[in-house]
Amino acid sequence: MFRSVARSAAGKHLLRRGYSTESVPDRKVAVLGAAGGIGQPLSLLMKLNPLVSRLALYDIANTPGVAADVSHINSRSEVTGYVGEEQLGQALEGCDVVIIPAGVPRKPGMTRDDLFNINAGIVKGLCSAIAKYCPNALVNMISNPVNSTVPIAAEVFKKAGTYDERKLFGVTTLDVVRAKTFYAGKAKVNVADVNVPVVGGHAGITILPLFSQATPKANLPEDEIKALTKRTQDGGTEVVEAKAGKGSATLSMAYAGAIFADACLKGLNGVPDVVECSFVQSTVTELPFFASKVRLGKSGVEEVLGLGPLSEYEKQGLESLKPELKASIEKGINFANKS
Ligand SMILES: NC(=O)C1=CN([C@@H]2O[C@H](COP(=O)(O)OP(=O)(O)OC[C@H]3O[C@@H](n4cnc5c(N)ncnc54)[C@H](O)[C@@H]3O)[C@@H](O)[C@H]2O)C=CC1
Ligand SMILES: O=C([O-])CC(=O)C(=O)O
């Protein structure tokens, strides 16, 4: 269903904000885990997104309150809260984009892989429901360990006969957000102008920021590039330690998740040249999943872009990350196939 708003006040407002469409299609977005630390601010940000017409907020508890609260905001989308597994189908029906921040976060001393035992099962259950109720939706996987939860989702969809590799995304946008912020600080450039691709995966050394391709160019010395790389790789841990047992990044993640979902919606709506980094099925390396720049279009992934020229340091980083990333991918695939 399309609502023609081109000449209306709403249409002019969207054009001013860079949403240059002749008409704005109706789009339903669901947030699964909407009452959580990420889910709540992400629901708020999706409510503010004028590309969303229906916003479904799902969790196993507390969504009625979050939905009532967010629904009072005077923006375009209609908000509905769904609570408990028996309402999951309704939440998902008709969805264009499903964002998944459901699952437990890290505490100090834990790795993302330590979350596998709990989150793998949560993601598997949610993806089975997606295969049933909205098999064509773009899935934005935030739940950790992303290096394993994305392969789990792929296997669940394959088993259900609904897998379309163009529609499954591991959200690595927070790595890009961090790389941009940290680079701008060191390079003394305007953060709003900065671009840095981040490739690989989303855990420790599998996070590989390509500062040799960062713009604006700053010619930072090698030791500063190494420090920036390490800080980007440990960005999640920096927040986990600062929160001292009260969880991991939620606000910056909600921001990053909202940026990525907005890019998916723009792609679906036919906006040209929408490019974001994401962990997707890939032939960029010999690994079956890999994060790199991805062009988004009307069916999801339109093109997985290559790595571009790498510095010697980045080439070494790429080789070092492969064994860990491969093992995490295989762990996810094995879990989905044996349970
Ligand atoms: N991809 C990324 O860059 C990042 C990923 N994360 C991950 O996001 C996940 C969520 O983090 P937080 O929001 O801080 O955790 P949280 O514990 O605050 O919220 C998680 C929410 O998921 C809900 N939930 C649990 N099982 C569910 C199910 N079966 N269906 C629906 N909802 C369910 C809980 O009720 C809770 O409201 C964690 O796994 C965390 O590691 C966190 C930051 C960055
Ligand atoms: O570090 C964590 O556990 C959460 C996360 O993925 C991040 O902040 O990048």
Image (cartoon, rainbow, N blue to C red):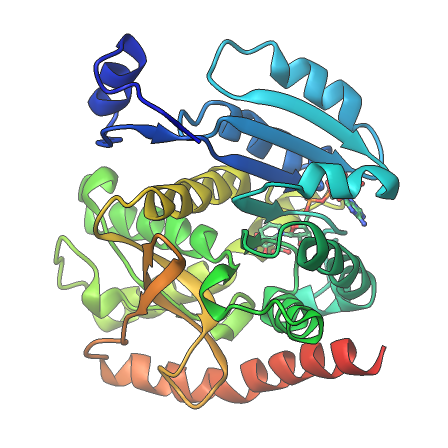
What is the x, y in percent for residue 127?
Answer: 70, 59
Is residue 228 left or right of 207 when viewed as pictured? left
Q: Give x and y (percent) for residue 24.
A: 34, 29
Image position of 26 with respect to 120: above or below: above
The C terminus - image quarter? bottom right
Ligand 2 in which quarter: bottom right
* Viewer-nearest residue: 328 or 158: 158
Which quadrant of the rendered structure holds the N terminus?
top left
Q: Quadrant of residue 324?
A: bottom right
Q: Position of residue 22 (x, y in %)?
A: 23, 29
Would residue 316 be visible to someone looking at this image? Answer: yes
> Relative to 322, is 21 on the left or the right?
left
110 relative position to 241: left or right: right
Residue at 50% across, 74% down: 205
Q: Is residue 169 above or below residue 283?
A: above
Q: Give the total number of marks visible in the rendering.
A: 0
What residue do we see at 63% from left, 50% from top?
134
| Residue at (18% x, 63% y) in the render | 220
Of residues 254 and 96, the one nearer the viewer is 96
| Quadrant hosting residue 313 | bottom left
Task: From the top left corner, tell me how far across and down residue 116 is, in percent.
Answer: 76, 67
Whether residue 251 is visible here, answered yes or no, is no
Position of residue 172 in the picture relative to residue 13 (left or right): right
Tell me the residue at 24%/72% (across/down): 222
